[in-house]
Image (cartoon, rainbow, N blue to C red):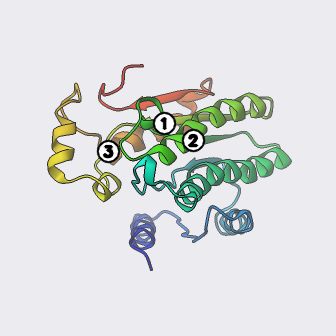
């Protein structure tokens, strides 16, 4: 099993150890049939979905002049297509049952400022921004809120796939708050958007970047 799968299973075990319910379901988000099977399995195991967080994403760094169709398809399938159809599948079930709900998409500061060797990634995350606003508009009559989080450089494995620790440290020095984001910084924003505290917030992009982007 891939490392990411092991991490998900470990998190699920931690949640159960804390006395909560958790279910890990493996799916290829570039395949609509697997998305539908995943959502069905989740609802069967845990009940109706109230909040969806579209957090799956990949960023294999490739210079633009070396970008292949397969690189483009791989990134767009997971980052944009997967986000779209996970949201659609869950929203259809919310609408059919008359339930209000929330959808939170993960975009990126790279959608606004670019990223080295990331034409495909930036295009996918820019698409998530536009998709978030359009979904918010269409789903508002059904009492489904749709927002996005745009993290800046975050202390996860992803930036280390294409950047050294020295490069990451140098990037951190350019951030006004003096450090890169921690996963909890992003998670707390997602909790806010999922809560009743954000009951009148939809179609918004919340930037979590320590001042690294001030657009």
Q: Which corner quadrant holds the C terminus? A: top left
* Label 3 crowd bin: few (<14), some (14–19), many (20+), radius 10 Å: many
- Label 1, secondary structure: give it: strand
* Label 1 crowd bin: few (<14), some (14–19), many (20+), radius 10 Å: many
Q: Residue furthest front?
A: 65
x then y, percent, for residue 187: 41, 44
Task: Name the residue beneath numbered marker 3.
Answer: 154
Q: Residue furthest top?
A: 215
**Looking at the image, is mark 2 or mark 1 earlier in the sequence?**
2
Horizontal arrangement in the rendering, residue 67 relative to residue 42 (left or right): left
User: Is residue 93 placed above or below 40 in the rendered structure?
Assistant: above
**Looking at the image, is mark 3 or mark 1 earlier in the sequence?**
1
- Label 3, secondary structure: give it: loop
- In depth, the one of 111 and 116 nearer the eye is 116
Task: Name the residue beneath numbered marker 2.
Answer: 104
* Residue at image point 52% right, 66% down: 22
Q: Residue furthest bottom?
A: 1
x then y, percent, for residue 122: 49, 41
- Cβ atoms under marks 2 and 1 closer than 8 Å: yes
- Label 2, secondary structure: give it: strand
User: Is residue 168 placed above or below 174 in the rendered structure?
Assistant: below
Task: Name the residue beneath numbered marker 1.
Answer: 149
């Amino acid at each position: 099993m891939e490392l990411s799968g092991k991490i998900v299973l470990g998190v699920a075990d931690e949640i159960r150890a804390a006395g909560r319910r958790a279910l890990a379901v493996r799916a290829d988000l570039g395949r609509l049939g697997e998305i539908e099977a995943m959502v069905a399995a989740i609802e069967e195991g845990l009940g109706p979905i109230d909040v969806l967080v579209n957090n799956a994403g990949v960023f294999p760094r490739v210079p633009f002049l070396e970008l292949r169709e397969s690189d483009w398809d791989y990134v767009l399938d997971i980052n944009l297509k997967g986000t779209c159809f996970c949201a659609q599948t869950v929203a259809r079930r919310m609408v059919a049952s008359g339930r209000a709900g929330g959808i939170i998409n993960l975009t990126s500061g790279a959608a606004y400022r670019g990223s080295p060797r990331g034409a495909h990634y930036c295009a996918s995350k820019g698409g998530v921004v536009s998709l978030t606003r359009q979904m918010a508009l269409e789903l508002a009559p059904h009492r489904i809120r749709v927002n996005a989080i745009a993290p800046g450089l975050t202390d996860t494995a992803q930036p280390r796939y294409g950047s050294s620790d020295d490069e990451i440290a140098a990037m951190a020095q350019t951030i006004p708050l003096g450090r890169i984001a921690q996963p909890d910084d992003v998670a707390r924003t997602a909790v806010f958007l999922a809560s009743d505290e954000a009951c009148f917030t939809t179609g918004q992009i919340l930037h979590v970047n320590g001042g690294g982007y001030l657009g």
